[in-house]
Image (cartoon, helix red, strand yellow):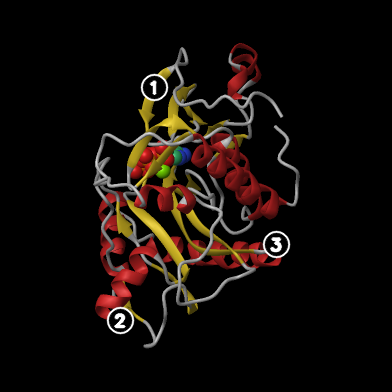
Amino acid sequence: MGSAEAITKTELPLQLLNRGKVRDNYLLDGNILMVATDRLSAFDVVFSEGIPWKGTVLTQLSLFWFDFTKGIIPNHILLPNAPPELLSKFPYLNHRGVLVKRTRVLPIEVVVRGYLAGSGWKDYQATGKVCGIDLPSGLQKGSKLPEPILTPATKEEQGQHDINITNGQAGEIVLKATGEDLFGKLHGAAIKIYKKASDYALSRGIIIADTKFEFGMLDGQLLVIDEMMTPDSSRFWPVDGYTPGREQASFDKQFARDYLETLNWDKRPPAPSLPPDIIEGTSQRYIEAYEKITGKKFNF
Ligand SMILES: Nc1ncnc2c1ncn2[C@@H]1O[C@H](COP(=O)(O)OP(=O)(O)OP(=O)(O)O)[C@@H](O)[C@H]1O
Ligand SMILES: [Mg+2]
């Protein structure tokens, strides 16, 4: 493997479109050079320490899934790496930068859940539903749902938590943003992607409990964008030891979250510093998720 130094900020001689919690986006010939850094965000707060290899894992897993699901819906990928002329000047971009189509991002988070966790579990406990969708009674924390469901959320400003909404509300937001009634198409694609990918992941020992997609429009075409089924956008649980009714072990940033829960931190900035063993453990879990899912050694 190359250098294990974490990349937490990029400064490229291109127009910066935005710095998200994790990705830095630059304009390149009308397209976007999307660079996944090693920044870690938990509880919507970004930490100053990076997680070595995290950005590479996010980029490579997304590329794996975009390819795996391209028959269901087209995606935003133009080039699976940064262009060669940039790579030669900025070698750290290798395997973590991708060139993507610049789309108009639909202003909803498209969450698909196959299992009950996180805000889904909270909603269910309070109302017996998730985002207005009726579910059977007697489900436990971590239970598998009879069918995967789409539970959309608003996209809130940085630092704010997204708010769960109904499919009807999401449909109206999409209609208002695009002038087109696209929600049915988007819903169908999201559920199909989740089913195909989660069946495959299960065969590789991982439960994808839930995941978040983003969609964008370009020239009248609906595209799936951003990242796809990474440990940042999903809950990955090992099949071995899966038991509903309790917290599951995980390959995602739950490991870092569990540590943060032991601190007396109010989950507001500034973020506490992360000890080396938590950084290392998180890095290992991301790499393990990549290796389990792709069946390939992480060798970048
Ligand atoms: N093809 C695309 N066209 C336009 N924007 C894109 C595309 N793919 C991803 N994005 C945007 O790039 C950003 C990725 O950065 P990152 O994931 O770090 O953001 P974030 O902190 O999660 O913020 P957000 O809440 O906006 O997603 C997101 O705002 C996402 O919507
Ligand atoms: Mg994001």
Q: Residues within 10 Å of mark 1 (few under 14, many from 20)?
A: some
Q: Which mark is residue 141?
A: none
**Quadrant location of ligand 1?**
top left
Residue position for label 2: 128
Corner quadrant of residue 45: top left
The residue beneath circle 1 is 16
Total numbered labels placed on residues in the image: 3
Q: Position of residue 95 (x, y in %)?
A: 63, 31
In the image, is residue 8 above or below residue 236? above
Which is nearer the eye, 93 or 118? 118
In the image: residue 175, left or right of residue 203: left
Mark 2 or mark 1, which is nearer the start of the sequence?
1
The three-letter code of the residue at mark 1 reads: Leu
Q: Residue at x 61, y 70 (%)?
A: 241
Identify the residue shown where x is 26% and y is 61%: 172
Q: Earlier in the sequence, mark 3 or mark 2?
A: 2
In the rendered image, which residue does mark 3 sit on? 204
Q: Nearer the viewer, mark 1 or mark 2?
A: 2
The mark nearer the N terminus, 3 or 1, is 1
Residue 201 position within the rendered picture, expressed as x and y whole percent measured from the top left: 65, 62
